[in-house]
Structures are given as structure tokens and as C-alpha cells.
């Protein structure tokens, strides 16, 4: 919610503070960098201090970042504020994943992880839509208000049940912590799942970054129609995140790998179909592909986190999800510029869509190997 509010207000922020296009781009990069770099330490911290305190700390840190941005008079302050927002958000997924693991039985976790992940597109919608108030209350008022809502949510998190982490714990040394993180990296199944997570998130970021331009250039759509397809992608991912979790629990017997293999096959097929889009068939084909990619590639995170919880020991659940988020964010950072490089060197979108499909299938082939090993 906070990041999307800032990005939606970025033209006004740039005009007021005299920021360049490169500096606006660095805002999103700084957020992802903070989130990715702190994911594993934040996960380990969530294992130690528990769900309630982690989410309170996450919300207050993120709100502090929003307030810094709202009162900022320079690019440095905006950058510092967005780094605080990314730092706060790094605690959210490990703490929330730990909550699902501790508070709910295994046969419901896939569905609940999917429901939890609907917060991503919903929060993004709230953040983006809030920018319409900027002409009335100013971009500072919009971002400050979002920060106040975030802080209020932090206080509400104190009403959550205790997970027992408030009991005294043995003091851990830096060597102990590094050893615990090393055990996560030596888990081969967790590593292959995270490879798949990174490539899936890369595909999602590619769609977010290039779908509108593809529709304008390759399909001849005007900007309103192109944005409508992007909205279809986001709305579809809300239902997809819940559906795949439910399917895992109720149909796939809790085996997240089967769900991910099916999801990846459909998503890769959607990327391949993107190579067939022309100005003649785009009006009929693109809404269907937007739904197909929205409910697959853009909806995989919840199932991948459920697989992470199945793979990792319970005491390391937060750290394992932090590891997953690190890999996920690396994919989001690397994939869009790599896709753009293929566009420049290949001269068109067809090769880039095809290579994206191949990358997704390659990653999920490792999950099939894990499943065959039993």
C-alpha cells in the first residue's frame, strides 16, 4: 500500500522536488533492495520475537518511512523513507507465514496462505487509488494518511493470539545465527523451490513492467484499453491466490508441488500464446491471456510459501520464508531488465515471451524431480 501510493504520486513528487526519471526509478529499486537484503535476518527475528511483535514492528517501521517521505524536501529524504518502508515490509511475510504455520492445521494452510497473499493486490489497489486525492490534500497528505493507516494496523496486530515466543529464550550468538542461516541454504528442496519462486516473481514483474507497452506497440491498444488489461491481471490474481491454495488443500492432498506444476504449465502456455498476439486478434485474445497469467504466474506466491512451510523445520519457519522472499525479490530485480535486454537485442517481444516461458518451465522441472524422489 505504501510503496504503490508513493509510485502513484511520483509525477507530483518529481515536480515538487525536481526529481529526474532515474531518481524516481531508484525509489522502487531501493524498496526492493531493502526488502530482499533484510528478508533472511527479518525471518530469523520473527522466529525469535514472535508474530505479534514482528507485525507491530513492521507496521511502525513502514509508517515511519511514510511519514519521512511525506515531510521530505529532498530526494535523499524520500529515498531514506522508502528504505524504511522496505525494511518494515521485510518482516511481514515471515511473521504472517509463521502465524499460519502455528495457528492452523496443515490441511488448511494452503488456502490460508492464498488468502493472506490477496493483501498484495488489494493493498496495491488501495495505494494506487489513493493518489486521486492528491489534488485535494496534496501528495504529502496522501502518503501521510497511508502511513497513519499503517500505524493503526500495527496497533491492531497486538490483538492477535500469542505464539509462545514471549517465553525466555536462550541467547544466540552471531555464530549460532550464521549456522542457522547456513542450514537453510543447504536445504536442496528449499533451494529449488526458491529458484522457482524467483523465476515466477520475475515473470510477474515482467508483466507489470511491460504489458502496457506490449499492448500499445504490439496490439495497437490505446492507453485506457491497455491499462484495463493490466487491471484484469491484478483482479484475476486476487481470485487465483485463493483458488490455488484451496485446490492444494482439497484436491491435491496438500502437495503444493503438484499445484505449482499445473500452475506453471498454464502460465508458460500463456507466455507462449503472447507470441501469437497481433493487432487483428488482440481484442479477443488479450483479456483471456490477462486472466490466464493473472491466475497463474501472478498468483503463485501463496502456494510457494506453503511449500516452504512444508519443507522447513517449524523452528526455522520465519527464516525459511525470509530465504524465499530473498530469492523472490532477486527474480523481481533481475528479470525485467533481462527481458528488456532481450527486446533490444532480439528486436521484438516474441523471443522475450518465449524465453520467459522456457525459464519458468525449467525451474519447475526441479520441483518435479523433488516430487519423484518422494
Image: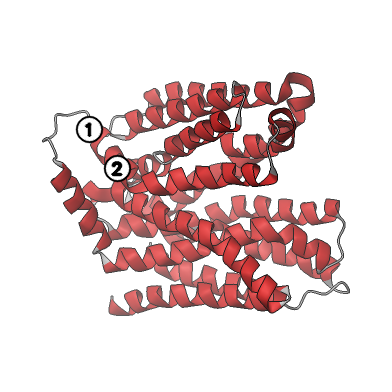
Regarding residue 272, the answer to whether it shows in the image is no
Residue at the spot 29% in from the left edge and 48% down from the top edge: 319
User: Residue 222 at what x, y percent from top left?
Assistant: 87, 56
Q: Is residue 141 above or below residue 215?
A: above
User: Residue 271 at what x, y percent from top left?
Assistant: 64, 72
Residue at the spot 66% in from the left edge and 51% down from the top edge: 234
Few, some or many residues within 10 Å of mark 1 (<14, 14–19, 20+): few
Residue at the spot 52% in from the left edge and 74% down from the top edge: 359
Regarding residue 19, the answer to whether it shows in the image is yes
Q: Quadrant of residue 147?
A: top right
Q: Secondary structure at mark 2?
A: helix
The mark nearer the N terminus, 2 or 1, is 2
| Numbered-mark total | 2
Find residue 102 and name its label: 2
Residue at the spot 72% in from the left edge and 51% down from the top edge: 231
* CB under 8 Å between discs 2 and 1: yes
Q: Nearer the viewer, residue 325 or 315?
A: 325
* 3D distance between C-alphas at marks 2 and 1: 10 Å
Specify the quadrant that holds the C terminus: bottom left
The residue under label 1 is 164
Q: Nearer the viewer, residue 208 or 139?
A: 139
Few, some or many residues within 10 Å of mark 2 (<14, 14–19, 20+): some
User: Residue 50 at what x, y percent from top left?
Assistant: 28, 34
Amino acid at each position: 500500500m505504501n510503496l504503490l501510493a508513493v509510485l502513484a504520486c511520483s509525477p507530483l513528487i518529481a515536480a515538487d522536488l525536481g526529481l529526474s526519471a532515474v531518481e524516481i526509478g531508484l525509489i522502487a529499486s531501493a524498496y526492493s533492495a531493502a526488502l530482499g537484503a533484510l528478508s533472511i535476518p527479518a525471518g530469523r527475528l520473527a522466529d525469535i520475537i514472535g508474530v505479534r511483535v514482528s507485525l507491530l514492528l513492521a507496521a511502525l517501521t513502514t509508517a515511519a518511512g511514510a511519514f519521512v517521505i511525506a515531510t521530505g524536501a529532498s530526494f535523499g529524504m524520500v529515498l531514506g523513507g522508502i528504505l524504511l518502508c522496505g525494511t518494515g515490509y521485510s518482516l511481514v511475510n515471515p511473521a504472517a507465514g509463521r502465524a499460519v504455520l502455528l495457528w492452523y492445521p496443515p490441511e488448511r494452510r494452503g488456502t490460508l496462505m492464498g488468502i493472506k497473499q490477496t493483501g498484495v493486490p488489494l493493498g496495491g489497489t488501495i495505494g494506487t487509488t489513493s493518489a486521486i486525492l492528491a489534488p485535494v490534500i496534496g501528495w504529502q497528505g496522501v502518503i501521510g494518511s497511508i502511513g497513519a493507516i499503517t500505524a493503526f494496523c500495527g496497533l491492531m496486530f497486538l490483538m492477535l493470539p500469542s505464539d509462545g515466543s514471549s517465553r525466555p529464550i536462550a541467547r544466540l550468538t552471531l555464530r549460532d545465527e550464521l549456522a542457522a542461516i547456513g542450514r537453510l541454504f543447504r536445504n536442496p528442496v528449499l533451494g529449488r523451490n526458491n529458484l522457482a519462486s524467483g523465476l515466477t516473481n520475475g515473470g510477474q514483474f515482467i508483466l507489470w513492467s511491460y504489458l502496457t507497452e506490449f499492448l500499445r506497440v504490439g496490439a495497437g491498444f490505446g492507453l485506457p484499453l491497455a491499462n484495463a488489461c493490466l487491471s484484469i491481471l491484478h483482479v484475476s490474481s486476487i481470485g487465483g491466490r485463493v483458488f490455488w491454495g484451496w485446490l492444494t488443500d482439497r484436491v491435491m492432498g496438500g502437495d503444493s508441488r503438484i499445484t505449482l506444476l499445473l500452475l506453471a504449465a498454464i502460465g508458460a502456455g500463456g507466455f507462449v500464446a503472447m507470441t501469437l498476439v497481433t493487432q487483428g486478434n488482440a481484442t479477443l485474445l488479450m483479456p483471456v491471456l490477462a486472466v490466464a497469467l493473472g491466475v497463474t504466474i501472478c498468483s503463485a506466491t501463496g502456494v510457494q510459501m506453503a511449500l516452504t512451510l512444508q519443507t522447513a523445520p517449524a523452528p526455522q519457519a520465519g527464516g525459511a520464508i525470509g530465504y524465499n522472499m530473498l530469492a523472490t525479490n532477486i527474480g523481481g530485480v533481475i528479470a525485467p531488465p533481462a527481458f528488456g535486454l532481450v527486446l533490444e537485442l532480439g528486436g521484438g517481444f516474441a523471443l522475450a515471451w518465449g524465453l520467459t516461458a522456457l525459464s519458468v518451465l525449467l525451474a519447475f522441472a526441479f520441483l518435479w524431480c523433488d516430487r519423484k524422489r518422494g
